[in-house]
Amino acid sequence: MNHQEIYSRAMKTKYILSALLVILAAGFMSCSKESQPKGNITLEWWQFWTDPSISPTIEKMVLDYEKAHPNVKVNRTDLTWANGHEKIVVAFSSGTAPDIIELGSDWVPEFSSTGHLADITDSVVNDTARFYNWAPVIYNDRIYGFPWILGTRVLFINRDLMNRAKYGQKFVPTNWPQLKEVCYKIDSLGKDVYGFGSNAAEKHRLYKKFLPFFWSYDGRIISKNGKYCVFSSDKAYKALKFYKELSDSCSMVDTQRRLEDAFLDDKVGVVISGDWLLKRIRNEKPDFNFTTTLIPGPKFPGKSFAGGEYLAVNAKSDHKAAALDFIRFVTNAENQLLFCKANYSANPSNKETTKDPFFADDINLQTFVVQMNSSQSPPAIPQWVYVEDIIETALEDILFNGAPMAERLYKAKIEIEKLLKMR
Amino acid sequence: MKSRRFTGWLFATPWIVTLIVFWLFPLLYSLYLGFTDYKLLNSSYSWIGFENYVALLSDHDFLLSLKNTLIFVIGTIPVTTIIALLLALLIDKKFPGRTIFRSGYFMPSITSMVVIALIFTNLYSRGGYIYLLAKIIGLSPPDNGFLLSKKTALFSVMAMDVWMSVGYYMLLFLAGLKSIPRELFEAAEVAGAGLWRKFMSITLPLLKPVILFIIVINTIKSFQVFVEIFVMTRGRYGSSTAVYFIYETGLNRFEFGYASASAYILFVIIALFSIIQFGLLRQEGFR
């Protein structure tokens, strides 16, 4: 091989390598384009916060995000709780769902299990320690949503009725025997005064009031492997026995709204409720003499029910990375604080937000923050809507229709197990 | 001729298209869905034959809702019809303030069902006026109000339904009464017939077409009872009805296949009832 041949072969190799480099660079560029969109994009966001007190904050968040990301426009659509769920289901089934959807905690499994939500596990794995309550968005060990504004329930106590029942200013019940005693004493104050506010068979509500008692006994509904129902247990029996005793002997039994009305009218001494009642008291009866405390249990503190709002990305979205970026923005500590201040919400998902003086200086908000640490969500299974119904019907039969407890719990277990096998 | 026929079709087209798109197609499509396991969120579904129908016939919730619907139909229709007829007979007489009574009785029929249901929810609750009234007259209402008890929830909704619909049927009876020739009553009076005789021999036979109409439309309406249950009890305390079951299955659980099958069972029951009613009343000479 002469010098010229060697030179020409070297040149050829150089051209081939250059061409390969160009192809590879183009490939990398297209890859990075997919994860970090550069062109103008529009994100569709469906959300439920429409109250005039919070709407401007939501709007401000959107504007701030758009200002920081001039290539992104966020189209916000407000849904209502009356028909929002139906709209989301129809949108998913017709392929017209938005990029980002706000979902109630118990809705997530039905969408994640049917493949409608994007699996964001790899992108959020480092965030999990900084946020509360990921349980409702985990399906088959993968994560399908981001916690936003959460909610738990605590014990609300009417101080005036406690005073009339001769309790000291600082006393709060910390265990079940004390709770029972307080409720009995308040109940004995007069004909129209009740110790405890016990929920009637209201759909989607009754089970939320019973489960904290059940969980406080470390009860489980579904076995750890998800195959069996373990609801009909000694724990359920004991919890239900206590709850029924409270309900039968010293309670007003009514809908949640009417129980809260009665609580504010000094007719019910103790109710279990969420932060919406704090907001209501602040707006309607700021001088109302009350206190909040953690849910009592057989041992202190008892467990409470955790739910809330989650943000999820549509699996078919063309802008998953941008959608997730927007979700991170909305759920960052600063924006969650803005939100909670505007809405008087007690449970932001971002743990850093809860360290702000807004929460630390407000004893009632602090109760909610602390309660979140011992709160639990129902099992995140797609069949939950049916399981919930079976549990509520069983509770209705036992609490209000005189069904034998052990027998009815066993029947519920059989029904749930059948469901787990069928679907 | 051809052009006239074309014009006719052209004018009828909007209605025909509406009929096909919004009535016939959904009707046939839901019949088809009843034989599938279609769930709105699942991307695929398959033909499962009569499985939905077989499952429904052993579904305790569905059977209970059917039973409640039948109780609703059998319980409300005779009561509504008799009260409406009595009111119409009273209002038909001339007395001062008759118009006020007529408008008053009719008023609930033109008021939103949701509004009435919400008002009655309060009236029935503990401390509500009906609850207190029941206590005053010595009855023992359920501790937590009428709607929060399995014994009274459904019957309370039925009572409200009678109160609400009686005015409308009263008006239909009034129209029927007006169409009876006065000479017949005059002739009967001359022959010495009393009030009861006139009612049994003239009023009732001549009101038969109206009675038939009222019973048929009230049966169909009562089989479809939904709003009252949705607003007042949400199907709790054993008060679920067939349409509420369909709503729950279709629009809460999105099991369209199962919901369609239950809707068709209800459809068949309503059709059977209507056919039987027409048949029986024809046999009795109601034409």
Image (spheres, coloured by chain):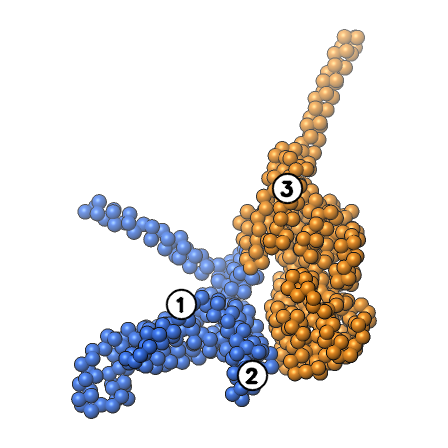
Chain colours: A orange, B blue
What chain does badge 3 belong to?
A
Q: Which residue is mark 3?
A: A63
Observer-nearest residue: A318 or A141? A318
- The residue depicted at 39 percent of the width and 78 percent of the height is B80
Observer-nearest residue: A323 or B84? B84
What chain does badge 2 belong to?
B
- Mark 1, residues whose alpha carbon is within 10 Å: few (<14), some, or many (≥20)? few
In this rendering, position of residue A196 left or right of residue B51:
right
The mark that comes first in sequence, 1 or 2, is: 1
SS under mark 3:
helix
The answer to whether residue A189 is above or below residue B245 is below
Observer-nearest residue: A84 or A271? A271
In this rendering, position of residue A336 left or right of residue B43:
right
- The residue depicted at 73 percent of the width and 44 percent of the height is A123
- Tag 2 near tag 3, CB within 8 Å: no
Q: Which residue is mark 1?
A: B110
x and y percent of residue B227 in the render?
A: 48, 67
Query: Mark 2 or mark 3, which is nearer to you?
Result: 3
- The residue depicted at 35 percent of the width and 80 percent of the height is B87
- The residue depicted at 62 percent of the width and 66 percent of the height is A204
Q: Which residue is mark 2?
A: B141
- Tag 3 near tag 1, CB within 8 Å: no
For the residues labelled 3 and 1, the Cα–Cα distance comes to 46 Å
